[in-house]
Image (tube, grey):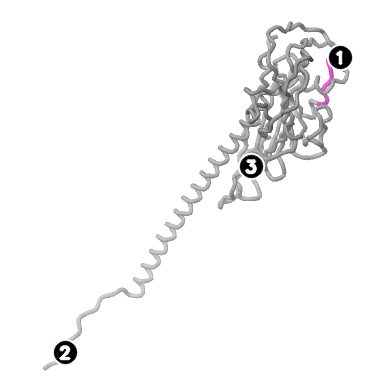
Amino acid sequence: MNRSQYRPAHQGGFSLVELLVSMTLGLVMLGALVALFSTSLQTNNQSSSSAQMTEEGGLAMEFLARYVRMAGFSTPLVNASGASVLVNGIQTQAKESHFVGAGVRGCDTGFVDASLAWGNLSCKASGSPAIALRFQGDLSNTEPSSASKPTDCLAQAITATTPSDYDNTQQITLVEARFTVNDKAELVCGGNGNGFVAQPLFGNIEGLRLRYGMAADGRSTQVLRYVNAATVDTLLLADGTPATIDQRWARVVSVKICMVVRASTPDQSQPQPYVDCDDQTVTPTDKYLRRSISTVVTLRNRAALIQ
């Protein structure tokens, strides 16, 4: 028998070139999938960080704004005369509420000692801005304590009372709070419920800027300009004589608040620029996303005044 008639069947397969081309195409597709997944993950992380900054920044801003809005507030007195007198060339309203005097004070560089009495607060040479606020507190405009007492910014009961400026036979509760941003990127507050020992309220608040809307005097409601705290502390009376702390700060009608909020975790992309509180574009040196948020808050009592 002729063996040439029994040849083995032809065995098909990939050549080396075909195998290399297939592997290359597979790697290209895999790389595209990895890039797509990485982009999707990065977008998801950025969306999550953006939502976190929006939530934390919004809560911190609303909390601080609520106290700024209440600065100087006192329960209106229906039977008060509302008469005004001329003092040092400035038309000054006679006492018409339980609480008089400035309800807000600020320092562009923070307070030397935030636990001191209102009239003894002074500014440091450098540091984060700070603001002190005070108003007449009750069970409606603060969170009542378990003993039904007004509370400060840390929900601490305020047991001490002070005589009313309108009628010293009556006692009122004065709520005081001092806010700033510490070196741990936290918005902190100290209240008179525990001697102004500051405690953190909100994290990832990296910066704070405050500008004060100034009126011509302590009765006018029209904002003439926004200035920093140092400028407020240089203001004089209409006749050019030095003004007291209360006379200077009683001219504040509104406060422009700006915060720089930082993401809680770093982003894997390149550092992302943001617009800061001075409207300047800043590119950070790290990979944390940041955003500035701002609002203008009118002091409740000043907005209600009628010329």
Q: Which residue is mark 2?
A: 4
Disc 1 vs disc 3: which is toward the camera? 3
Q: Which residue is mark 3?
A: 203
Q: Which residue is mark 1?
A: 239
| Amino acid type assigned to the residue bearing label 3 in the image | Gly
| The N terminus, quarter of image | bottom left
Q: Does dot 2 land on a helix, a strand or a loop? A: helix
- Residue 239 belongs to the span the image colors magenta: yes
| The C terminus, quarter of image | top right
Residue 183 found in image quarter:
top right
Instruction: Identify the main secondary structure in magenta.
Output: loop
Find out whether the residues at labels 1 and 3 contact each other: C-beta distance under 8 Å. Answer: no
Q: Residue furthest front?
A: 147
Would you say 23 lies left or right of 287 here? left
Q: Position of residue 277 (x, y in %)?
A: 67, 35
- Tell me the magenta residue range: 233-240
Is residue 85 shown above or below 64? above
Residue 80 found in image quarter:
top right
Q: Residue furthest left?
A: 1
Find out whether the residues at labels 1 and 2 contact each other: C-beta distance under 8 Å. Answer: no
Q: Distance of mark 1 from mark 2, alpha carbons?
A: 126 Å
Residue pictured at 77% horizontal, 36% vertical: 110
Q: Position of residue 111 (x, y in %)?
A: 79, 35
User: Which badge, 2 or 3, is on the more N-terminal residue?
Assistant: 2
Q: Residue furthest right?
A: 241
Residue 134 found in image quarter:
top right
Q: Does the image show residue 52?
A: yes
Q: Distance of mark 2 from mark 3, alpha carbons?
A: 87 Å
| Amino acid type assigned to the residue bearing label 1 in the image | Asp
Disc 1 vs disc 2: which is toward the camera? 1
Closer-to-camera residue (137/268):
137
Find out whether the residues at labels 2 and 3 contact each other: C-beta distance under 8 Å. Answer: no
